[in-house]
Image (cartoon, rainbow, N blue to C red):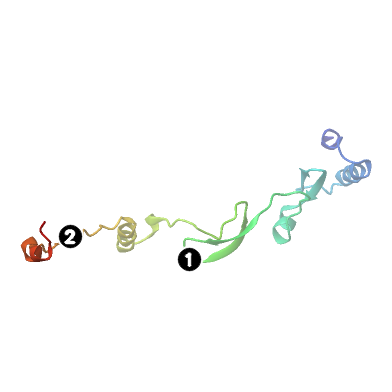
Amino acid sequence: MLLKYILPGISHHLRQTLTNNYRKGKFERIKLIYYYPFFVSISSSSASVTRLHRAVYTRQYPLVMILPDGSSINVRYPEPRKIIKLPLDLSTLSETERKARLDARKPRKKLKVVDEIEDNFNARKYMKYIKKK
């Protein structure tokens, strides 16, 4: 019996309940997942429809995920971020769209601005304002 080896660290009542359910065949296609401090039995369908069935789980932050087709979904993510955009597969685009996307990725050339300074300063023009000793 598998439960004999898994269950020694939990309470007697919970161990008895899990053992009885196992004998009755209620654990077909149901996973036993150990989250400290006790076991939780969940099926994949109930976990996807309702909340996360965990006593202890890491903090997860709400996030908006943008799919390649432009649609967005709200998901949970372990790091605090606002938005994640999934990459677009360029092999699915037409030739003109692919070229436009690749051109947009290339760095733009910086224009060099050259200032010409007009130097028509004449120092002799201001000699009359300088006092001679």
Screen quadrant of the N terminus: top right
Residue 70 disc label: 1
Secondary structure at numbered mark 2: loop
Q: Badge 1: how crowded within 10 Å, few (<14), some, or many (20+)?
A: few
Rendered location of residue 29, percent (x, y): 75, 48
**Residue tagged by mark 2?**
114
Q: Which comes before the other along the chain, label 1 or label 2?
A: 1
Cα–Cα gap, marks 1 and 2: 43 Å
| Residue type for callout 2 | Val
| Left or right of 5 on screen, residue 85 | left
Q: Nearer the viewer, residue 50 or 74?
A: 74
Q: Nearer the viewer, residue 8 or 76?
A: 76
The correct choice, above or below, for 86 with respect to 13 in the image is below
105 with respect to 112 (left or right): right
Rendered residue at 71%/61% (across/down): 49
Give above or below for 86 relative to 24.
below
